[in-house]
Amino acid sequence: MSAGDKIRILIADDVPEARDNVQKLLQFAADIQVVGQAGTGREAIDLARQLTPDIVLMDVTMPEMDGISATQVITGQLPGIAVIMISVQADPDSLRRSLQAGARDYLSKPFGLEDLTGSIRSVYQSLLATRAQLGAAAALGTGPLGQAAENTPRAKVIGVFSTKGGVGRTTLATNLAVITKLATDKRVAVVDGNLAFGDVGVTLNLTATKTIADLAPLVGMLDDDMIADVMQTHSSGVKVLLAPPSPQEAEMVSAEHLRAIMGRLVRMFDYIFVDTRPSFDEHQLVLLDLTDTVLLVLTMEMTSIKAAKQYLEVAELLGYPHDKTTLVLNRLDGGSQITVEDIESHLKGRLKSRIPDEPTAVLRSINEGVPLVVSAPDGRFALAVNNLASLVTDGAVPAEDLPEQKRGLGRIFRRGGAAPATALPAGGA
């Protein structure tokens, strides 16, 4: 067997003797070649980019960046490389976290030659299938991360993200999409990236007759018509790709499926707003990698501010440019003991959007399935969302004129007979 036909392995372990022992063990496998060793998680990422191995054998516990964090980066940014986690920790929690990070197998130390080579060969066969899917996506005009080819017009992708739940991501994502569609009449889509527990359908009053799970088995042959058939149309004209109706069906959608589907979507639309879930799992990393702008949503709570700071630290490790992230303060409350200046100082960044707190109006909007930018277009929430839409669309949404232009749309789109939301007093937006 020639060297070019061998399975290329990178070993990542902070103990040199452990790395050498694994390399010596693999010398007995004629179809496997060790191409490098790394002593830290960060070094593993750098060498994975340089050496392009087929598989990284990744130790869980390492300095600078642990193996699970490094695995998240590698599987998110280098989908053609697989990771097998190796560890002396055989507890269920380590296994679960490793698989959530994107590892394809988990080996407990000590292991023998048969266990190691069996895992490598099995994972390699699975990797070949993944590469075939990525190749099919590339043949359709997308790059290795599902990005459109350079000569193909590409949508601007705006992700709405937080590592803390309950901060209003879905409400912001759907309202931003609707206001962008009504103001520009561009091709606008919403993708529910919270595959297991998505609420975009509830927020927009759409029934999940077809979802992203229907596209997963077709990723090798996707075309625009297939995707259009699965997407639903909101009354505003926004196209919506819904999450599966149950966590069980969500498991049918792999990160590779999501990457290939997004690769088609960016060629079909001008703007795509992506709702997410509070996690750094493999699916969310795929979405974050593909977004042009990440709207990092936080509220005036210490736990939310802490979560925002954690994201900023991870974003730096992922190599995201600083201007990719836009800080959005949701539910601005003038009575909070925490000031805007305190938050900006702690996060070392400016809050470029401040959405006022209108809990009654927002709750009614969600329950009725009518975005607040439609039911109360002149309210402070709608005005603030409009200004944020203007920011992320580079001025395509006319920030000053939109509220007047949309006056009265609530009567057209409303399901119920509730009165329009009452605007908050000045001092928030």
Image (cartoon, rainbow, N blue to C red):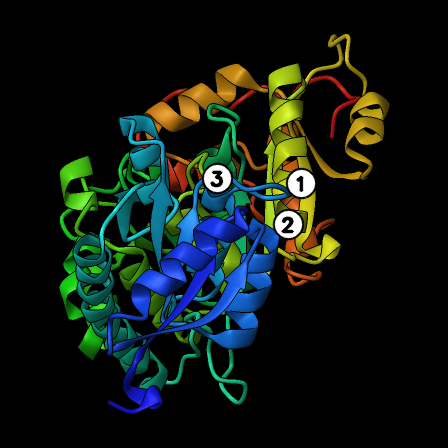
Q: Label 3 to label 2, Cα distance in Å?
A: 39 Å
Q: Is disc 2 in contact with disc 1, using a CB cutoff of under 8 Å? A: yes
Q: Is residue 185 visible?
A: no
Task: Report helix, strand or loop for mark 2.
Answer: helix
Task: Report helix, strand or loop for mark 3.
Answer: helix
Residue under label 2, please give it: 317
Tag nearer the camera, 3 or 2? 2
Instruction: Please state which amino acid type lies under the numbered disc 1.
Output: Glu
400 relative to 407 in the view: left or right: right
Instruction: Please state which amino acid type lies under the numbered disc 3.
Output: Val
- Image quadrant in which the C terminus is located: top right
Q: Position of residue 410 (x, y in %)?
A: 45, 37
Depicted 320 relative to depicted 208: above or below: below
First-in-chain label (3 vs 2): 2
Which residue is pictured at 47% across the width and 23% down the height?
Answer: 166
Q: Is residue 216 visible?
A: yes
Q: Label 2 to label 1, Cα distance in Å?
A: 7 Å
- Image quadrant in which the N terminus is located: bottom left
Residue under label 3, please give it: 374
Q: Nearer the viewer, residue 306 or 1?
A: 1
Label placed on residue 313:
1
Q: Position of residue 213 (x, y in %)?
A: 18, 54
Which residue is pictured at 74% across the width and 8% down the height?
Answer: 335
Depicted 168 relative to depicted 256: above or below: above
Q: Nearer the viewer, residue 280 or 35?
A: 35
Instruction: Please state which amino acid type lies under the numbered disc 2.
Output: Leu
First-in-chain label (1 vs 3): 1
Depicted 193 relative to depicted 261: above or below: above
